[in-house]
Image: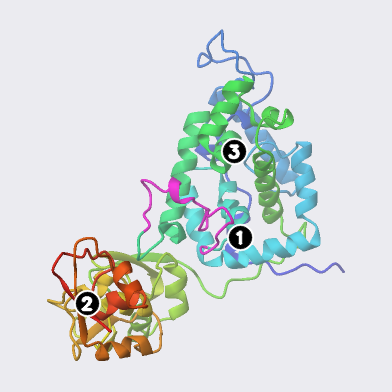
Amino acid sequence: MRKWYSVCIVCCALLCPLPLVASDLSGTHEALVENAAPTAKEAPDQQIEGRPLRTRAEALPERISRQQKDRTRGENLPTLAGFEREVVQSAVKRWSAKPQLRWIESCLKNGEPYLAFVRAEVEKRALPPDLVFLPLIESGFLPTAKSASGASGLWQFMRNSIYPYMKIDEWRDDRRDFWKSTNAALSKLEAHYKEFDDWALALAAYNSGAGAVGRTIKTAGIRDYWLLSEKKKLKNESVLYVPKLIAISYIISNPRKYQLDICKPEKEYSWVQVAVDRQINLPLLARYAEIESADLHRANSELLTLLTPPGEYHLKILRSDEERVKAVLENQDIKLLNHYVHTVRTGDTLYALADHYGVSLQSILSDNAGLQADKIMPGDKLMIPAIREVAPYQTSNTEKSFAHWSGTWTVKNGDTLWSIARFYSITSEELRQANNMPLDAVLSIGKVLRVP
């Protein structure tokens, strides 16, 4: 007897035959027949080649009969049109080979924490359900994935394409935020569809840029993704992009046919956002709330350290952990930010300390009231945020020798740190550190410096 593999209950709900929804009838070129009559939307003298749109009423009977036929055959077909095309069938054959099936399974395993959220957002916007699997072909469903070209996150955003949806600073990279990046990606896809009135072209625009696709359409005089692909007018990556998504969506939607092993998730991943009004350390929050630290990190992969940014921040946590986390956050007696305590020694600088502990200079200044970067003294005790585990800072031998620098140099017109350091056969960095000078310090005539 043929062996069937276990199928994940949650994923089965995601992959089951889909009911007819408004987005199925929203006027995409792919869902309409070749010989439909032109609509009033198209100008009589339009020279762009492609399939004319049919009205929603005209498309409805054909779509219903097609779905009924598909269910009779016991298959779940993609909602994006083009499945019958040779290039898509070729993609199905390729991605249903055993090595590729194992890769798909591993990607779905990666995506267990995010699949339900992505599907819910796609459904909320009434978008084609196949878009749920776009992060699989973009990043393998890994929020920390980074491409050779610098794209990052589940949906692989480049730095120059995140405005106005996300931000990147010293604390976070929102491209790795599954919540924000999903909404940003779906908003971009909706905008592309609104521009091109075709989901295949919208996906090509997501892959290679709306500007590039628009110029290709204008130059070729063709507004049909499949025709542009056949004539090799699009980038090769975009030519393969849509067939790959349709093929993988079909394979995942028919797991028994391909003996796709989709295991049951270990837990239900339902996420909520909780406002945090102070900077906190994630491991400390997990410890006091008695929740899994791995879940907290997985949900907030955008954070570049173990700390939330200063000010208000919306932390993502499992719905099942919500009450415990809120109880800890509301208890002001619980300290959720730990520090290293550093006793300043001769030669220490805030810049060197910030670099060693992996924090910004501003973080040290903020956590030490009244501290000035160029006025630390031996014996001062500094509170330094512990965003990672590091060994205590050790002053180098060269820095320790600063205590024996008893000479002085009075700055004259034309002097620079480099020229003075060269005169004493030392480095300008040693001279700067010995005098507790910031990196951007400007020498003023008459200033007295400590020298060997």
Q: SS for tag 2?
A: helix
| Residue at image mark 3 | 204
Q: Which residue corresponds to the image point at 57% horizontal and 32% vertical from the top-left?
A: 213
The crowd level at tag 1 (other Cα within 10 Å; few <14, some 14-19, many 20+) is many
Q: SS for tag 1?
A: loop
The magenta span reads 143-168
Looking at the rendering, in which quadrant would you find the C terminus?
A: bottom left
Near-viewer residue (373 or 284): 373
> Which SS type dominates the magenta stretch?
loop
Give above or below for 341 relative to 351: below
Near-viewer residue (437 or 293): 437
Q: Are marks 1 and 2 in contact (CB under 8 Å)?
A: no
| Residue at image mark 1 | 140
Q: Position of residue 449 (x, y in %)?
A: 20, 76
- Residue 338 is one of the magenta-drawn residues: no
**Color theme of the render:** rainbow
